[in-house]
Amino acid sequence: MNIIRILTKSTMKPTCRIFLSHRNSLFFNTNYQSNIDPLRVLGSLRGIHNTHKAFRLPGSGFGQSKAITRPNDGFGSLPSRVVLALSRVASYSTTVETRVNDKSFERIYVQGGAGVNLKPLVVERIDNDENVIGEEESRIEVNGDGVGGGQANVGNSEGLSESKVAREESEAEKVAWTLLREAVVMYCGSPVGTVAANDPGDKQPLNYDQVFLRDFVPSALTFLLKGEGEIVRNFLLHTLQLQSWEKTVDCYSPGQGLMPASFKVRTVALDENKNEEVLDPDFGESAIGRVAPVDSGLWWIILLRAYGKLTGDYALQERVDVQTGLKMILNLCLTDGFDMFPSLLVTDGSCMIDRRMGIHGHPLEIQALFYSALRCSREMLAVNEGSNNLVRAINNRLSALSFHIREYYWVDMKKINEIYRYKTEEYSMDAINKFNIYPEQIPSWLMDWIPEKGGYMMGNLQPAHMDFRFFTLGNLWSIVSSLGTPKQNTAILNLIEAKWDDIVGHMPLKIGYPAVENEEWRIITGSDPKNTPWSYHNGGSWPTLLWQFTLACIKMGRLELAQKAVALAEKRLPLDRWPEYYDTRTGKFIGKQARLYQTWTIAGFLASKMLLENPEMASLLFWEEDYELLEICVCALSKSGRKKCSRFAAKSQILV
Ligand code: GLC
């Protein structure tokens, strides 16, 4: 169990310092731990950690003990000065090169030492290559400058008008607010998140009693729109502390910037009258299927920006530890691999759809969240010499990614007809059918389904493979982030309107359309009994998608569509006890295994109502087209060169 712990006396209000426990026997053998000078530890670590990740020794994961899950694992006797020095180690390479299409940027590595795992030891606040600005104790103080420093400055936001006349809440809203408040999770006397579900009848809550990062986003927005920033601030800072925590799946360590899928607050009894609360994150190592929570870090970035925008408290995103965390996520996403495309390559189940559903590769949902997170980061990263290359890498990626998605993921009548007539096996730079798509791949449902007006972004694109399924979250975020062109964004909502019965039906909104059935279900899901056709991730309807639909509608000036969907939800959700999802083609029945009192259903509904009421606040949460980005092309190939720039050659959607 990986934990962040605090020591408290059961009778006293906790002092609320947070520190990371560490189980490296080399440093924390009880016999000599009290002699450790934290500054010496810092000093020696600096040397150890200034190595490039590429030179990390293969054995660097060894030496760590996973056995110390007991409350009294030696930390009780650690002097507090040592305890407070426990945190993350940050260092980074010194590579600064400038070349066309430069992908080198400041990398921040938090890594194990040579032969021993020294990961979560010390935070060094680093600004640029040579300057360690200061050493930070890994500590968040309640009622100080840290987490619980009272209400965030809500009211200073760009668009928040305090004078808005309050409308009488509907019964459904009142109930939803009570339930949302009951879902709040406290840690060390402060609110830090909301549980995924609070279903009293649930005998097997599995991990639904945890705070999921993605699930907390609608809760966070609801609180922010209400003027309550503290819980969001706490959440952002606590999850940041979890980011670089030691995490292993069968002795293999996933990347350091990874954010957990979820965390739980556990209370552990120490001796006599002492209790300790611990934060116990899950990076996928306990999750069903051991899926990587790729979207967690992206959501964290999106929420960090939203927090600043809606509260006016920009100081949080400017903090050095927050900037470091942000860069770590970006490094993980922007790191070079074998990819041929600017889209992010991920395994199946790495997002809201966290079970096998055939979405490995380059699923739209991840690309849209990635694009949104990059746009957020571009606004939030402190620009200095140390971050120049990272900013450049972000701009280049944004530009390449939007071109790629707009050009190759777009589906409408015209595009299907083009694919239908594709020639295959084209070997050349000028190939029209670049991914060698065999026209037989166009599914028969699509030929009938595609409306004359409207279109959408397909679910996934790989060599010789187009996944034509419509995935709602990815399409909505293409609109919200302006990943799609203005025309495409309008067309996506037109398609939803034209296909209302399929995508909204009795309950907004379908997670994906259509379901995979029969042999396809057997092959694609691995015969998953939870993802049977028209259930759960396989064509189920998820009310939590409502707030994202509302945001997209507000952006595109289609308020009436959102209002219609919200009205449907308002009628059914309280009666049905706020289920996690609905089943059947039209979302008629409460999902087979749906939890009741699912928090992101409740919060998604409340957020939708509040966004509709405050469209000026909603406008702080989406992006318009960025024309500067469209002009960036770093391949340095002109029309007169030996090779043509493929972007110029494409009959591009990019500017329409
Ligand atoms: C399920 C969903 C996932 C959600 C979690 C908690 O695993 O697939 O998206 O985060 O439940 O609600």
Image (tube, rainbow, N blue to C red):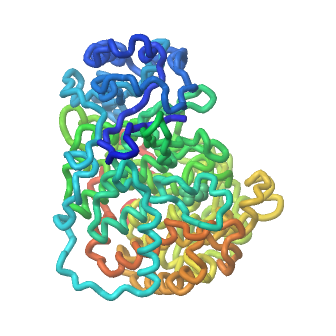
Q: Residue furthest right?
A: 519
**Residue closest to the eye, 407 or 49:** 49
* Residue 490 found in image quarter: bottom left
Residue sitting at x 68%, y 71%: 591
Up-down: is 610 above or below 158? below
Residue at the spot x=50%, y=48% of the render?
A: 264
Image spot of residue 46 (x, y percent) = 30, 17
In x, y percent, where is residue 326? 33, 42
Q: Quadrant of ligand 1?
A: bottom right
Work out whether residue 423 or residue 446 is closer to the camera in this orientation and state it: 446
Left or right of 3: which side holds 330?
Answer: left
Residue at position x 63%, y 42% in the image: 290
Query: x and y percent of residue 333 in the render?
Result: 44, 40
Dividing the picture into quarters, in which one does residue 100 lie? top left
Q: Is residue 491 visible?
A: no
The quarter of the picture where the N terminus appears is top right
Residue situated in front as seen by the camera: 368 or 349:
349
Judge left or right: residue 452 versus residue 271: right
Q: Say whether residue 146 is left or right of residue 635.
A: left
Up/down of 265 relative to 655, above or below = above
